[in-house]
Amino acid sequence: MSEFKYKEYDLEGLKTLEAMAAAPRLNQWMYDTIKKNMTGKVLEIGSGIGNLSACFLEDGRQLYLTDIRDNYLAYLKNQFQENQSVSGIRKLDLVHPDFDTVYADLLGSLDALFALNVVEHIEDDLQAIANCKKLLKKGGRLLILVPAYQALYNGFDVGLEHYRRYNKKTLSALFKKNNITITHSQYFNFIGIFGWFFSGSILKKETIPKGQMKVYNMLVPIFRIIDKMVLNKMGLSVIVEGVK
């Protein structure tokens, strides 16, 4: 397992989020994939610069925004503070050593919680899921999306400080060990596998090229069809959803 030192300012992560911002169709596709049960009082873990947050808010859904880094929180407040659909914006460390005390006001309060491309950054992923569960009401929904297939681990993952990649079995195991009932699991973004492998493993790049994401964005309508054709049996990401 790789060892990473927490960086207060994550340049590689910011570049990736900015590249993702150049792919609004991809963000919308991701939102369309996860939105069904993300209703009521919903909290997003790791909002970053708000790529997915914006999709929720544009759809008129209430959303609580959180992140662990101050620079992202400053960006979120600048962009979304005045939005009436924003329930709040605050710092949240999913594996804070005094989690129950620091976030006492949130415990058992949420109808739904999602974390997209977050858990792979956390060494103790089992505790991360346990703390997600603590924030949910009984019957609350938890949705996690993470990078798929350890065989695809490359320079992108190192630069982004990913401890690991997952598959449906390994991600589902985190839910089961925390007694969260799994209601749905799937892979997402089949064609993305090839771009990730080519740029990260063949070209040895450490950050996702923004130009590449712009091209990808243009082709998203085709890629959405391809995901349906492969029945979401393979993809660059894996999604698991469950109920407390």
Image (cartoon, rainbow, N blue to C red):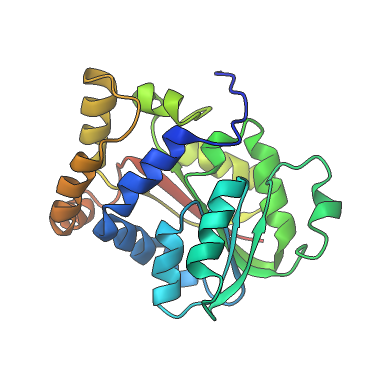
Above or below, 226 against 234 in this view is: below
Specify whether 209 is left or right of 107.
left
Q: Position of residue 24 (x, y in %)?
A: 28, 59
Query: Which quadrant holds the N terminus?
Result: top right
Q: Quadrant of residue 152?
A: top left
Q: Position of residue 206 (x, y in %)?
A: 35, 25
The residue located at (68%, 46%) in the rendering is: 94
Q: Quadrant of residue 89?
A: bottom right
Query: Considering depth in this image, is 67 or 185 the residue closer to the camera?
Result: 67
Above or below, 24 against 188 in this view is: below
Q: Is residue 166 visible?
A: no
Q: Is residue 199 visible?
A: yes
Specify whether 121 is left or right of 105.
left
Query: Considering depth in this image, is 168 or 217 the residue closer to the camera?
Result: 217
The residue located at (33%, 58%) in the rendering is: 27
The residue located at (28%, 55%) in the rendering is: 26
Q: Quadrant of residue 87?
A: bottom right
Q: Position of residue 182 (x, y in %)?
A: 55, 55
Above or below, 208 against 216 in this view is: above
Query: Which quadrant holds the C terminus?
Result: bottom right
Query: Considering depth in this image, is 151 or 98 the residue closer to the camera?
Result: 98
State the count of labels: 0
Q: Position of residue 43 (x, y in %)?
A: 60, 64
Q: Residue furthest right?
A: 101
